[in-house]
Image (spheres, helix red, strand yellow):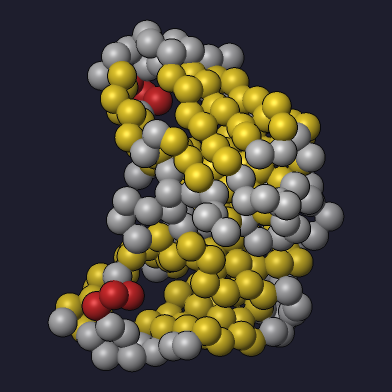
Amino acid sequence: DAGVIQSPRHEVTEMGQEVTLRCKPISGHNSLFWYRQTMMRGLELLIYFNNNVPIDDSGMPEDRFSAKMPNASFSTLKIQPSEPRDSAVYFCASRPVTEAFFGQGTRLTVV
Amino acid sequence: GQQLNQSPQSMFIQEGEDVSMNCTSSSIFNTWLWYKQDPGEGPVLLIALYKAGELTSNGRLTAQFGITRKDSFLNISASIPSDVGIYFCAGQLIGGSQGNLIFGKGTKLSVKP
């Protein structure tokens, strides 16, 4: 299995632009998570899906952030409009039951 | 919200030394997971613990699920340079949402050759 696949690995964008991060979970895992990692706040859960349905989005910072999971093999995290304070590493993770498996992350820089 | 207190925040040790780190909480967990994150990579699962008192090893790594269910420990014996990285604990709350793992802030390990 290729593991959790995220794209792009790096994204540099200008403030105000729309950013879309993509994730392909491990096949057969029924839960998918989006995390944000910064030096100051560590790993923060943004949203998670169970069987493609959003269960808890209380970690989404504000309305500029949105996430979708149209099917079991694909999810997106969108930021519109992006701001410099959104700069961070964004991780996607999937779980069969308990153990979460992480992708390599997308390093987002908003200038 | 629930929090995990992970300590120490950072460690500088000599190659060959043993390492200990732990996570504690006021909440009760039914699962403890330990991850390692290398620079530029995502966290990788090292050890999973599912029962109070459980002691599990993975090579030079040993982790324990505390009897009270409120803590967990990770030990690394005879450290080597490739042990460098950030180690995270994560806990699944008893009665908590099935999806949510709570992560500690991490322990950054540096090893001097």
Q: Where is residue B97 in the image (x, y as percent from the top left)?
A: 78, 47
Residue A38 can be seen, yes or no: yes
Q: Quadrant of the C terminus of chain A?
A: top left
In this rendering, the answer to whether B24 lies above or below A77 is below
Which residue in the rendered view is the most extreme toward the front?
A: A1
Front residue of B71/A82: it is: A82
Which residue in the rendered view is the most extreme toward the left?
A: B113
Q: Where is residue B67 in the image (x, y as percent from the top left)?
A: 72, 81
Q: In which quarter of the image is residue B4?
A: bottom right
The residue under the point 75% across, 47% down is A30
Q: Quadrant of the N terminus of chain A?
A: bottom right
Residue B5 can be seen, yes or no: no
The residue under the point 62% across, 34% down is A74
Q: Where is residue B72 in the image (x, y as percent from the top left)?
A: 59, 74
In this rendering, the answer to whether A90 lies above or below B108 is above
Q: Is residue B91 left or right of residue B59?
A: right
Q: In this view, does B28 lie to the left or right of B107?
A: right
The residue under the point 25% across, 70% down is B110
Q: Where is residue A91 in the image (x, y as percent from the top left)?
A: 49, 42
The residue under the point 47% across, 88% down is B59
